[in-house]
Amino acid sequence: MERGISRLLRGAGETMSGLGTPEQKLAALVRMHVVSHGTHRMLHVVNDTEFRALGGVHREVIGGKRDEYEAIWRGVVSEGISAGVFAVDDPRLAGFALLQMCTGVAHWYSPEGPLSIVGIADQFADMALSLVGARRDGKTLRTADLDLPDAFRVLADEPVEAAALSSGR
């Protein structure tokens, strides 16, 4: 569990590094989270479902890191609201909705399926922007409008299932 949540925290920091707008940050976070959950499924299934089995100091440490990760997402949503780019009332609830949507990938994604994990990550990023009502200068925003880093950039130092890269459209 430590490895899984630390991977996400590191990935969040690295993927948002150098990004200036809340819409870029949100789309990049979504893509990183989805790619990580799709390429390291078992790690994240355990990380996401077995927290209830922890007790004592382990629960406190992992719980603190999970809170930190969720706060990153809420912070990006709050930033977008403050900038007038996102139109949601509750950044905490929006953060939970986004995380739950993206986390689910670990439970159903298959590299043998019709879409690659990168294709899914890009579509989820568009859905996330839609969920928060992302608009700038009256225009609905999509990931194609944003200058985003490669979805695998933050995973470069870790092995990735080869099938996850090559399958799908």
Image (tube, rainbow, N blue to C red):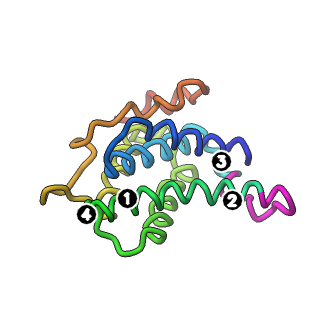
Q: Which residue, given by chain and number where applicable, does mark 4 sit on?
A: 84
What distance separates the C-alpha of mark 1 from that of mark 4?
9 Å
Q: Earlier in the sequence, mark 3 or mark 1?
A: 3
Marks 3 and 1, Cα distance to the nearest angstrom? 23 Å
Per the model, the C-alpha gap separating discs 3 and 2 is 12 Å
Q: Amino acid at mark 1?
A: Glu
In the structure shown, which secondary structural element does the residue marked by tag 2 occupy?
Answer: helix
Q: Which residue is mark 1?
A: 79
Please state if 71 lies on the left or on the right of 18 as rendered: right
- Within 10 Å of disc 2 (Cα), the crowding (few <14, some 14-19, many 20+) is few
Magenta-colored span = 47-60
Residue highlighted by disc 2:
49
Identified at 53% across, 52% down, the residue is: 108
Q: Are marks 1 and 2 in contact (CB under 8 Å)?
A: no
Frontmost of labels 3 and 1 is 1
Q: Residue furthest front?
A: 82
Identify which residue is drawn at 65% across, 47% down: 5
Sort mark 3 into few (<14), some (14-19) or many (20+) by Cα contacts within 10 Å: many
Q: Which residue is mark 3?
A: 5
Q: Label 4 to label 2, Cα distance in Å?
A: 35 Å
State the residue at coordinates (13%, 56%).
Answer: 137
Name the kind of residue labelled 4 in the image. Gly
